[in-house]
Image (cartoon, rainbow, N blue to C red):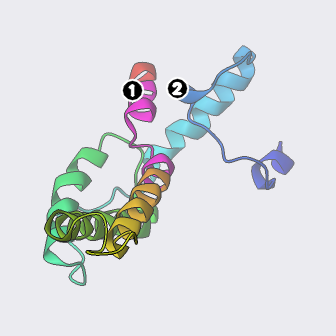
Amino acid sequence: MLMEVYSMGRPRKLNAVKTGHHTKEELEQAQLVENGLFQFTSISVNTVPEDLPPQAQKEWLRIVPLLKELPISNLDYILVKRYCEIICINDIAYEKIKEQGMYIKDTDKINEYFKVYIDTLKALKNIATALGITMDARNRFLITN
C-alpha cells in the first residue's frame, strides 16, 4: 500500500469520479483518504491576494466561497490564484477581440489576442479539472456526498 501512495502514475480520482469495478475494501480505503482531504485548512475567503489585478480579485471573491463545498485547501492557493489571473487575462483578450476583430485589418493574420484567448481557455480547462470545479467533476462529487 505504501508503494501506491508514492507511485508516479495517474493522479488519484475522487470516489465520485471512479469508474470500473472496485472491491468494498478498496472503496472504503479510498473514502478514508478522501475524507482526509477535508482535514486540511480551508482556503481563506477574507484574504484576497493583493498582487491580483482588480478583475482577478473580483473572481477570487466570487469563486473561493463556492470552493468551500469541495476539498480545496490552502495547499491549492496558487492554483486558485492562477485560475483568477487567467480569468482576468481571458476577459481582457475577449474585450480586445471585440474591439479589433479576430483578424488584423488588411491581412489574413489572426489577431494575437485571439491566440491569447484560446490559450487561456485551454489553461482554464486544465486548472478547473485539477481543482475539480468542472460541472462534470462537481456533479459526481456531490452525488457521493
> In the depicted view, which residue is nearer to us: 121 or 136?
121
Q: Which mark is residue 128?
A: none
Residue 121 appears in which quarter of the rendering? bottom left
Q: Residue at x 31, y 67 (%)?
A: 103
Residue 8 appears in which quarter of the rendering? bottom right
- Whether 125 is drawn above or below 82: the answer is above
> In the depicted view, which residue is nearer to us: 117 or 34?
117
View extreme (front): residue: 106
* Marks 1 and 2, how far apart at CA: 8 Å
Q: Residue at x 64, y 24 (%)?
A: 28
Element at label 2: helix
Element at label 1: helix
Residue mark closest to the camera, 1 vs 2:
1
Q: Residue at x 44, y 64 (%)?
A: 119
Main secondary-structure element of the magenta-colored stretch: helix
Inspect the magenta stretch and tell me whether residue 134 lies in it.
yes
Three-letter amino acid code at disc 2? Ala
Q: Position of residue 139 (x, y in %)?
A: 39, 26
Quick check: can you spot residue 136?
yes
> In the depicted view, which residue is nearer to us: 112 or 25?
112
Q: Position of residue 81 (x, y in %)?
A: 34, 68
The reply, left or right, for residue 6 in relation to residue 45 is right
Q: Which residues are magenta?
A: 127-141
- Whether 98 is drawn above or below 109: the answer is above
Q: Which mark is residue 16?
A: 2
> In the depicted view, which residue is nearer to us: 97 or 70?
97
- Whether 138 is drawn above or below 87: the answer is above
- Whether 97 is drawn above or below 26: the answer is below
| Quadrant where the N terminus is found in the figure | top right
Tag 1 residue: 139
